[in-house]
Amino acid sequence: MATAKHTIVALVEDKPGVLAHMASLFRRRGFNIDSIAVGGSELPNLSRMTIVVDGTAIMVEQVRKQLDKVIDVVKVSDITGDDMIARELALIKVKANSSTRSEIIQIVDIFRANIVDVASDSVTIEATGDDEKITSLLHLLRGFGVKEIARTGSIAMTRGNQGALKIVEKISNVRVKRQK
Amino acid sequence: MKMTGGQIICESLIKEGVEVIFGFPGGAVIPLYDTLLQYPQLRHILVRHEQAAAHAADGYARVTGKVGVCFATSGPGATNLVTGIANAYLDSVPMVAITGQVSRPFIGKDAFQEIDITGITLPITKHNYLVLDPGSLANTIKEAFHIARTGRPGPVLIDVPKDVQEVQADFKYPTKLNLMGYEPTVKGHPAQIKKASKLINEAKRPLIIAGRGVIVSQAYTELKRLAEVAQIPIITTLLGISSFPESHVLNYGWLGMHGMAYANMAVEAADLIIAIGMRFDDRATAKVSAFAPHARVVHIDIDPAEIGKNIRVDVPIVGDVKVVLNILNEQINTIEHMDWIRQLNEWREEHPLLQIRDFDGILPQYIISKIHEVTNGEATIVTGVGQHQMWAAQHYLYDKPNTFVTSGGLGTMGFGLPAAIGAKVGRAKNDIWCIDGDGSFQMTIQELATIAQEKLAIKIAIMHNGYLGMVRQWQDLFYDKRYVATPLSTPDFVKISEAYGISAIRVSHKEDVIPAIERAMNEDGPFLIDFMIEPEENVYPMVPPGGALSEILEEPKNEVEVWLRQSTR
Ligand SMILES: Cc1ncc(C[n+]2csc(CCOP(=O)(O)OP(=O)(O)O)c2C)c(N)n1
Ligand SMILES: [Mg+2]
């Protein structure tokens, strides 16, 4: 069966071991994790993870269920099919001299990226966008000589009030119940 | 109230209804053990190896339905628990394991006997904790017990640094839990249940496959009602044995690699499978692509991750078996399936595989059936892993609920003796028989000392074939009889047993089998019988590895050879 990229978002409690546990569930089944990004969420003590993996729909659904069983995982969904916004941040350090600098600046402008540091022989560019945009930017910059790249990996949410928002509803329901 | 960490642990265990702990001390748990002195209501049973502590807690949990508890020290104590924890994990057994850890300042420094046991057990526990704050101990223990016993049960490990056991903290047992990410679905979805009832009411050849979930949920009467009202034949999984009386007219044995031929044939012919509290393990389904080819599948299980994992399911119902069956039963019509039942009965008569052939030597099947007779079918049977396990599953007739204790998912040799300890502690008044192999027995033989020390009246029957029999059987059938590393020399089990202070006899003649079993029953204390069985007896029927359930081989050898020749595998 064909594999495809899947974007999985999860809300997890800020506890040690959650990340390792989630990663191990993928590792066990031979999944390669394309990227994993962890940060805060709209709720205190809960982190939000975005995991991008390559796999068959059935395999990914099986792992999603396993992730859901992890006690510290509050909610997890595969938002791949949904209408979603995915962004990542990249820092790219490119070789630059007086003759190439203006060309680089042009490219950066077209991609609505920023130059955040300038040195005698390089510039550092900050870019946000989806995977495709970052990849095409990188492609254009390679010709100048890329010295260093750091990418955060994708973070994602669904558009409008569908999908991921359900997570919040579920949590607030739990909260309400517990307060009673 | 201020208490030490050790006291908080003991107080919390008592609040959780714990009466017995299986354990083994060491440097990192001395403070906890020291506080046990103040809590005589907590019975501590000293095992001889931590693996046995986990298996005993497992056996105890299976027969009582309560959470089994074990203690071990850090490092080697904790790693010795690992097999037992994995065993409980795969068979969904509720357990709380408490391990000592090096004191907080030493963590992460490769200190003496420091091991990352929460890391090691991450994939084999339902959840685990390293407690760094003494103030959170009580809450952690409450959570651990809740997680272990609810939903799909499983083992939870709590790692407690030595200094956390010593320092004082406020103790107040929490009344509330705060587990945002844990809320097992208990009630099945009404629309799904409705769909299931429709399929059941319309089926011509329905078949129930009952698993251990029925036992965990104690849904015996609900299951029986469903079967009787809609006249649905029941087969079980290996771990589902004793979820439904085996002498009931609707019982057709159990399925799988060494299951009854007619049970496997029923799966093949059914037009509706109602799978209840089971997980379609590969030893049960055999070749998945050929499993139940004519059937729609209703799958009831509390673990959503089990649904659709191995087998395509038409109607998934996530929920507690008892709760779901109660609602489902209200929607089921009184139906008859006499043609189907007649067909199954015919198959059962044509394939009376469990008949024991006439033989001068001692057949293990004969021994098991005699143990059944002498114990009136009322004993709880605990087994090791191997051929003897299969014979014990096949030839004892399990009519009483939850009377078969075996290692299914992990297939852990050495499980039998320590699990029997747990079973006896949990069911002191019942007859507990440990049916073990000569190989399995030697993996945890040291527990004879525990049995002697605790005066546990366990009856041990060793199926002594001088082989790692199950592996030898595969070598016999699929590796041209090259018996590599399976012949087993054994010490004199009778002398060993007596050296441990447990009376024992050897039985080498068929006519001595029954008297020996009777003697074991009459003996007040523990008793061991070393049965010298037919060495190269094989377990049949058998679905060859890679084969479909319908390819089950009933007659030894020649049939296997034919199968092998035809097979392209
Ligand atoms: C810990 C462990 N090691 C190895 C195995 C593989 N294995 C399965 S059955 C078996 C033979 C068991 O021998 P014995 O206990 O004498 O039982 P028998 O089959 O002879 O009845 C072995 C080695 C296992 N299941 N567990
Ligand atoms: Mg043997």
Image (cartoon, grey):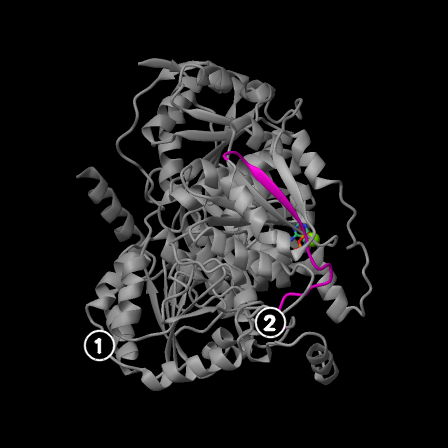
Residue plotted at (48% across, 56% down): B373
Q: In this view, does B440 lie above or below A63?
A: above
Left of B443 or right of it: where is B47?
left
Quickly name the residue at label 1.
B334
Quarter holding residue B204: bottom left
Is the same chain shared between marks 1 and 2?
A: yes
Q: Quadrant of the N terminus of chain B?
A: top left
- Badge 1, how many Cα within 10 Å: few under 14, some, many 20+? few
* Residue B86 place in picture, x, y as percent: 55, 46
Check disc 1 and report its element: helix, strand or loop: loop
Nearer the observer, disc 1 or disc 2? 2
* Magenta segment includes B539: yes
Residue at image coords 60%, 79%: B551
In the picture, the quarter occupied by the C terminus of chain B is bottom right
Is residue B6 inside the magenta stretch? no
Which kind of residue does numbered mark 2 sit on? Pro
**CB within 8 Å, label 1 to label 2:** no
Which chain letter matches label 2?
A: B
Judging depth in this view, the residue of B401 and B322 nearest the camera is B401
Region of the chain picked out in magenta, as a range: B524-543
Can you give x and y, in whole percent of width and height, for residue B83 in the image?
60, 43
Residue beneath disc 2: B541
Q: Tag 1: residue type?
A: Thr
The main secondary structure of the magenta stretch is loop
